[in-house]
Image (cartoon, rainbow, N blue to C red):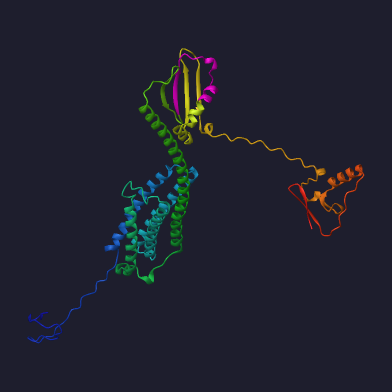
Amino acid sequence: MNCKHCNNELSVDAKFCNKCGKPIKIEKKEKIEIKGIRGRLSFFLFGLFVSTIINLIVGISAISGMIETTGLPKSWIYSLAFLDVLYFGGLIAFTIYTILAFLKLKENAVSLGKMYLILIFFSNLISVIFSAFTGEPIATETSYLDSSQIVVRSLVYSVIWFLYLIISKRVNNTFPKENRKTKTFDKLFFSAIIAIPIVIYSLGFIGSSIQQESTGQQSTEMNSTLSTENLIKETVKAIKIEMVLPNQLDETTQLVDITAQPSAIRYHYIFTNVDTKSLSNSYLKESLSPNVCQDSDAKKLLNQGIDMEYSYIVEDATEKYFISFNKADCQPQTAVQPKAPEQICNKEENCCTINEDCKYIWYTGGCNTSEYVAKMQKEAQEKGALIGEAPRRENVTCTCENNKCVTHY
């Protein structure tokens, strides 16, 4: 620091010049207050304006893609598209409302800015959570505006600008905290918009499950069909490599071709010099059955749902024969065991079927059927003899075991 009068160098804390002796006046710099829509705050508002255009483009793309979705009921698709219209329309309207509040220095401007950033953060966060649960990609990656990169940047953007609105001197000076207000309309507007993504992704999660289930069933059926057709084609190709066609099998039978059918392998034969009077489809099938059903390769194909077909043409004749074998034709037939005749139980021969058939007859000394005792008495009377008597016993029980009365003392 130098003296203004004599340009003498002074110490920092000098009050008088040690050369000319004049007092030193220290001029205080005016404090410049950072205030107004300038600097980073103006950049924030410019970002809001750009996001309005981006949301319009992304919204149109999302709605168009939703309408073209397949695998879901039309009513479901149109409901999701309508919710998308509400969300993007509401978000654009909320953004414009926020920009105007800042430009007009409204008392609710800062709270609207924070609400907008919460909307951006939440909507992108829920898309990440939805992707994690369903396995669906975060974005289609068809453009920069529909990419996972823009989702991550939006999350970071919303956090950084939210902190800026809290700690910025320009924001606090332009919109003093004591003057700030949050209107009831702003809260309702914010709540309505933030609820829409929850409904959209909830319906989308359910719809994705339905679509995956439907697609999975169709894919399984398609793969099964394709694998069967491919197996048939490869098998026919392998047989033709090992065999020279046409192939004369015997004096009357010639194998001329093997073809792949949608669910079968078909062998084509020509009969020569045969008597067709004894030929029929049933006769030929019965004759071929042992060879087909005992062949391990043929049985393996049959078990995989591939039929074996045999086509016969009689040379110089109009007769044609066609035989088909499927898995059921080669299943072993279970022999029906003849039912053993029911044993007839004659109570007069002391045969019983239930415990009630047996009664304690004291003078016979045990348990017998009433019919048996009556028969014995009749025979004894005819012979002029008596049935022997036995002492009477107490607490005797009778049971029927193996069609015989058993006495329990």
Q: If the image is split into quadrants, where does the C terminus sit?
A: bottom right
User: Which part of the image, by quadrant, shows the N terminus?
Assistant: bottom left
Identity of the residue drawn at 34% across and 54% down: 151
When the figure is inspected, residue 193 is found, relative to residue 255, above or below; the finding is: below
The stretch of residues the image draws in magenta is 265-287
> In this image, 152 relative to 185: left or right?
left
Q: Nearer the viewer, residue 279 or 53?
A: 279
Question: Which percent across, then down, holds residue 330?
Answer: 52, 32
Q: Residue at x 47, y 24 (%)?
A: 310
Residue 316 appears in the figure? yes
> Which sits in the foreground, 343 or 94?
343
In magenta segment, residue 253:
no
Q: In the picture shown, does residue 263 fall above or below 68?
A: above
Give 54 or 305, whichever is nearer the viewer: 305
Residue 38 visible in the displayed image: no
Q: Is residue 180 left or right of residue 373?
A: left
Q: Could you say where residue 244 lies in the image, as x and y percent from the top left?
A: 36, 23
Residue 58: x percent and y percent? 36, 49
